[in-house]
Amino acid sequence: MSINKQPSYAESRIHRLASPYRIRIWEIQKRIHNTWCQKWFDFIFDICKCYNIDISSANTELWGWLSAHEYTTMDFIEAHPEYPWKWSAVSDNKNLTYEYIIAHPDLSWDWQQLSLRDDLTIEFVNLLPNKPWEWHWICKHSGIFKNNSKFNLAAGNNILEVSKKDTTLIDILLSNLGEELFWSCISGNDDITLNDIRNNIDKPWDWRKLSRNPNITIDFVIENINKPWDWVVLSDNDSFTLADFDAHPELPWSWDDFKYNTCITIKDIRNNPGRDWSLSTITRKLIFEPLAATLQFVIEYKDKLLNIDWNLISEHMCLSADDLITHPELPWDQLCLSKNKWLNVADVPKLRTLYPDFTLHYENPSNTFANVLDKLAEDNLRLANLEPFEYDDEYISSVAEIFYRFIKYNRFDLEYTSFIKKEYRQHLAAFRIQQWWHRLRLDPYHPIGRKRLEREYDELCESATYGYTK
């Protein structure tokens, strides 16, 4: 497949509408991310070659994952047509543009996955009407209405009312789904407003799906109390607060589901220690609290049968090595700590005073490429010596198994961030030098600027003299 050198519609639009400064920034970002993509692939291929991991087209698992990965840019895919890309997996790539799909409509796209994309527009669907779109997914996912450029939702209009004025979208969905399935599918769309429901109250809505709608309020539920709401789903809808729950005890709430609701706050738990709270709910709220506040909570409520999950705390709370060393009496979990993204390679020597064999888990996003390569070399030696090796409590027999496990989940956030910052700093330094040199060249009082003016003056004089003699 040849590389398409023509700019995409999006690129052309940016160049038409954006200022030169914004265009420059966009081009810099694009170049830096393509450079990172190359570094990322070099890291993957180095591991595969070192440990004889198959990178041929036969390894569909690896290439399916690489094709869909957010670090794989479309520029990189176009620049390397020799790689066995899995186009059905590329359909799930965040960097995929619809211009690329239009330019290559005959590739093996996954149309179900394309139907789920958040940036899908009905205009794009109309360009390829004969493709096997999953219309029930198009109807469900948030954004399909808002992405329609003909809808003026910013003016406060309701989704379906605006749709009816421009019947294109509604007609397309109705013709492909049928009326009953259309209303069932659209019931699961989070963009549906309360006025949309009120103005079409006689339609065959799926009230179980509407029970998940984030726009639902307690007043609307009471207003339509005779509708077939799903109270298990409503109890898990974070549109409702504990105050709503307590203010309406006559409603058939499900406390077993409500106690997992993300609307529950740490204040709610403190004010109601006698309730049958979910252990995971308490823990997930404390994760976002400072360690001091968590310790205070534990001490304050230890006699009121409130407990927390220290595995979750160990893995997700913002912790430092000093926090762990200061509080060795707490029931930290070493495996979960090794996955904590707030702990990095620099913390390992400190933590080994507490846990002699502590090391960062392969899936810890604070790992660096160099650290993982060193760790793989050590573990490969252990496996070669037939020493038992566990990965999340499962025995592993080869480095390839380790690779497939961690490479799918670790985005190497710290390495990525450090790389992006370094590239931007280098660009900024070069830009400042360019600007400094540009100012000197334009300054008639500086020797460099004066020399430039003298040279240009001499060139003009020579040109004028040549023209006169001719």
Image (cartoon, rainbow, N blue to C red):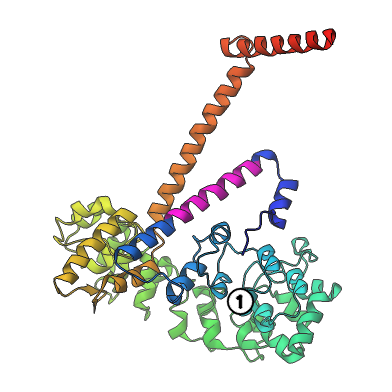
Q: Nearer the viewer, residue 395 or 392?
A: 395
Residue located at (25% from left, 52% from top) = 347
Residue range in magenta is 22-39
Task: Give the percent coordinates (x, y) of residue 378.
Answer: 20, 62
Residue 194 in magenta stretch: no
Task: Give the percent coordinates (x, y) of residue 445.
Answer: 61, 9
Q: Nearer the viewer, residue 369 or 414?
A: 369
Secondary structure, magenta segment, majority class:
helix
Q: Nearer the viewer, residue 2 or 89?
A: 2
Q: Which residue is mark 1?
A: 108
Relative to 45, is 347 on the left or the right?
left
Residue 6: quadrant of the picture: bottom right
Q: Assign the C terminus to one quadrant of the image.
A: top right
Q: Assign the N terminus to one quadrant of the image.
A: bottom right
Other residues around mark 1 within 10 Å, as few (<14) / some (14–19) / many (≥20): few
Task: Give the percent coordinates (x, y) of residue 293.
Answer: 32, 59
Residue 296: quadrant of the picture: bottom left
- Is residue 250 among the parts visible in the rendering? no
Relative to 313, is 408 on the left or the right?
right
